[in-house]
Amino acid sequence: MIGRRALLRYASGVSGASAATLAGLAGCASTGSARPRIVIVGGGFGGATCARTLRVALPSARITLIVREATYTACPFSNLVIAGLRELPVQQFGYATLAALGIEVRIAAARDVDAARRSVTLANGERLTYDRLVLSPGIDVDYAALPGYDRAASERLPHAWQAGAQTLLLREQLRAMPADGLVVMTIPENPYRCPPGPYERASLIAHYLRTHKPGARLLLLDAKDRFSKMSLFRAAWRERYGDRLQWLGAADGARVIGVDADARRVFTDFDEYAADVINVVPPQKAGAIAARAGVADASGWCPVYAATFAATLAERIHVIGDAAIANAMPKSAFAANAQGRLVGLQIARLLGDQEPLDTTLLNTCYSLVAPDYGISVAGVYRPNGERWAEVPGAGGTSPLDAPAASRALEARYARDWFTAITRDVFG
């Protein structure tokens, strides 16, 4: 397991050698161009980190960060908002610190990308040219993938998988439900963004029900038979929530094949369920700009070359964060932060006619089963050919038999991690 001190040291997820290289690159990269133009679309944990890294590694560059809104709302810890344990404003961050570093922050929607002409068109028609483009657009809900679930349906059956208004909508539905009501969560097959994390969310909703609506129940309908930290979660559910939380997997016929938002019903292969609150975690795909840029494949996600996260389907475009197919690496904020830092370094080297770095990336995913009960899984990843592969034996999970004090300590570590990474990214 990666210890707390190491975790905070590597909040970016990049190996120590790469972090040292960042300092060495500052002020000495030769790009062959007086002032290269780097455009980054998306200002989450991946895009904002990449912009910061490039500002240090390539100080001569003109760096433009395109963000849809002036305020970024973080998904990690948003499940606490749903459970009434945290308020949304503490999840929200601005870009003033990045702008103060000399990064041009544009509050606009990126409408299109012309890879041949190396340009990004904004919603107002303005066109920005680039030497390198970084796409970090996060996810979009794949509304075509689940019959009955569209944007209108999400206002009745919230997904809350893009933090903000949907987060608050789900919280208010939980507050308004009957004291002996039923909550149903639907969980799709992999891949999907995590966090929020469906199993952490289920845990914290169960905590809310136990605290405020002790007669209510939560039913999970999962398209999978196994999931990350499964043994840890299920043991914790038995200990903390008993019959209040029930999980059904694919072998139980729990794969959801459709919903009826007006009737508040969910349909599986063999059954249908009516509930007071239905949280649909829908199938997902890369943010829409990725498809318009021509870097998403038939899966809806973006294949990349492992070492540089350069798109395989277009030149001079890199894709990081949730939108990228990073193989063994999860679609987490920690991973996006690591990828953003790495790609900033790699772009500086590529523009300086240097070989890309050979590096290792780290990831740790914390989950809260309750406010005082944390568990985690850590992984170490290296390129293996053109894939990111987990280094065998280098990661691990929380011990299954850990005492309550250890669970409470991991919950504190999770909060420390969130404080550290948001300070690192947003200032």
Image (cartoon, rainbow, N blue to C red):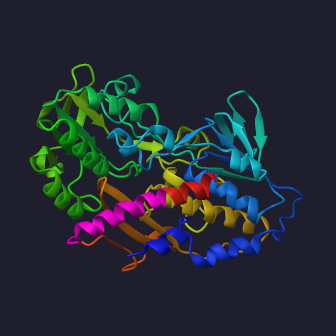
Name which residue lies at 46% across and 35% down. Answer: 164
Q: Is residue 249 left or right of residue 156?
A: left
Residue 151: image location, x then y, percent: 41, 26
Q: Is residue 372 left or right of residue 215?
A: right
Q: In the depicted view, which residue is nearer to us: 270 or 63?
A: 63
Q: Is residue 344 left or right of residue 201?
A: right
Residue 363: image location, x then y, percent: 45, 66
Residue 181: image location, x then y, percent: 15, 30
Name which residue lies at 37% across and 24% down. Answer: 155
102 shown above or below 259: below
Q: In the depicted view, which residue is nearer to us: 25 or 375?
A: 375
Q: In the depicted view, which residue is nearer to us: 213 or 102?
A: 213
Q: Is residue 335 left or right of residue 248?
A: right
Looking at the image, how many numbered discs can be counted on the residues? 0
> Magenta stretch?
400-418
Quarter of the image for residue 379 reads: bottom left
Q: Is residue 198 visible?
A: yes
Q: Main secondary structure of the magenta part?
A: helix
Q: Is residue 404 magenta?
A: yes
Name which residue lies at 64% across and 53% down. Answer: 427
